[in-house]
Image: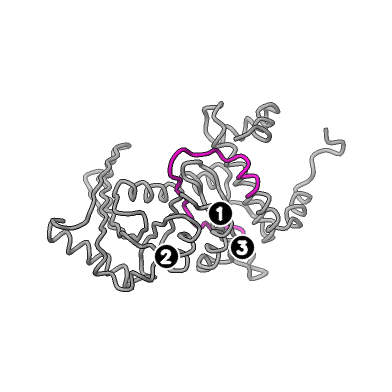
């Protein structure tokens, strides 16, 4: 019972603005380890960033808060996060975030922003493997990987250390085919020895057919997971899934992009709170409903709310 009623909006704002984000992050990480289920298999840790679009404050010259999060794809839980002032600062935030994680036996996936030699080395030193996307920030390496696949294709992959895997999905009048190739021959990759444990390059072709139109897109990767196209496909698909399982859920179910919390510490702390709530809601299996419905039930049903707050994940 709250003798003086529910605290006001301003009181909540002051509390979250006064909390130390670093300490809150530490407590969050400790809680994650206490409730995290042991996944029987290889965990994929997708590291990706997301901007809180309306957390900016033009009067103070303050841009929107950008959070870099580590999402455990199979366990469906945020393992940790770091705040930056801009997307371009992900390069400095990612190593700090990786330092807080247990990566042994995991595959870490990162988009092109995090394709850095130091980041690859850190992942391997912590006992993990990596799958890193390539784009313009590593233009020479990207061109050499693309050329390697062009040469292999010209030989129809005969006599080439390669592997192939394909998936197909249909739904809503759309068919998507994804083709995955890996190459274990890296002779055409300059400075390959500068990337710790680099032993394979990968290519994905995504083909979408809808309403009589067909589109095709290629993506290229470097990795330390060996010449196994199915394992490579699992890692790539896991990283793409972070958009739906984490970012989409935060925007649709928690309306994160509409949040007008402008105090940087409060915005960062509240993001951690959303991650806690999302982890509990996604891993609560007794109610077969969506996140929005579970949130409503938690507000109406004290027993269900207590189950979310206090039961083991």
| The one of 228 and 238 positioned closer to us in this rendering | 228
Give residue 34's quadrant in the image: top right
Task: Name the one closer to the observer, 233 or 249.
Answer: 233
Which mark, by number, is residue 56? 3
Quarter residue 20 falls in: bottom right
Residue drawn at (58%, 52%) of the image: 80
**Pointer 2 local density, CA inside 10 Å: few below 14, some 14–19, many at least 20:** many
Residue 196 against residue 273 in the figure, above or below? below
Q: Which residues are magenta?
A: 29-56
Q: Give the foreground label among 2 and 1.
A: 1
58 in magenta: no
Question: Who's the residue at 54% across and 68% down the image?
Answer: 92
What x and y, as percent, mark residue 217? 28, 56
Q: Picture quarter containing residue 18? A: bottom right
For label 3, the crowd category at 10 Å Cα-Cα, with few meaning under 14, some 14 to 19 and many 20 or more, is: some
- What label sits on residue 101 in the rendered view? 1
Say how many tags the image has.
Answer: 3
* Residue that numbered label 2 is attached to: 115
The numbered disc on residue 43 is none
Q: Along the horizontal axis of the image, is 35 left or right of 230?
A: right
- Image coords of residue 218 (percent x, y): 28, 57
What whole-number distance in Å separates the C-alpha atoms at marks 3 and 2? 28 Å
Pointer 2 or 1: first along the chain: 1
């Amino acid at each position: 019972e709250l003798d003086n009623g529910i605290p006001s909006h301003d009181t909540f704002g002051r509390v979250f603005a006064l909390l130390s984000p670093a300490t809150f992050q530490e407590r969050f990480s400790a809680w994650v380890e206490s409730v995290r289920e042991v996944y029987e298999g290889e965990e994929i840790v997708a590291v990706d960033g997301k901007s809180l679009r309306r957390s900016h404050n033009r009067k103070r010259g303050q841009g929107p808060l950008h959070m870099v999060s580590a999402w455990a794809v199979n366990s469906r839980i945020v393992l940790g996060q770091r705040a930056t002032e801009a997307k371009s600062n992900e390069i400095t935030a990612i190593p700090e975030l990786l330092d807080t994680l247990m990566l042994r036996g995991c595959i870490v996936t990162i988009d092109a922003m995090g394709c850095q030699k130091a980041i690859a080395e850190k992942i391997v030193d912590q006992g993990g493997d990596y799958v890193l996307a390539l784009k313009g920030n590593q233009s020479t390496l990207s061109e050499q990987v693309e050329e390697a696949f062009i040469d292999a294709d010209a030989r129809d992959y005969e006599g080439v250390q390669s592997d192939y895997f394909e998936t197909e999905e249909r739904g809503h009048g759309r068919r998507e085919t994804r083709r995955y190739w890996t190459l274990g021959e890296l002779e055409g990759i300059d400075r390959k020895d500068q990337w710790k444990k680099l032993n394979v390059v990968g290519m994905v072709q995504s083909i979408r057919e809808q309403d009589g139109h067909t589109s095709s897109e290629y993506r290229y990767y470097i990795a330390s997971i060996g010449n196994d196209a199915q394992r490579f496909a699992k890692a790539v698909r896991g990283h793409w899934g972070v958009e739906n399982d984490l970012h989409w859920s935060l925007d649709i179910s928690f309306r994160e992009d509409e949040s007008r919390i402008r105090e940087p510490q409060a915005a960062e702390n509240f993001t951690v709170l959303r991650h806690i709530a999302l982890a509990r809601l996604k891993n609560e299996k007794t109610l077969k409903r969506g996140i929005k419905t579970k949130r409503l039930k938690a507000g109406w049903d004290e027993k269900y709310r207590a189950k979310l707050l206090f039961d083991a994940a």
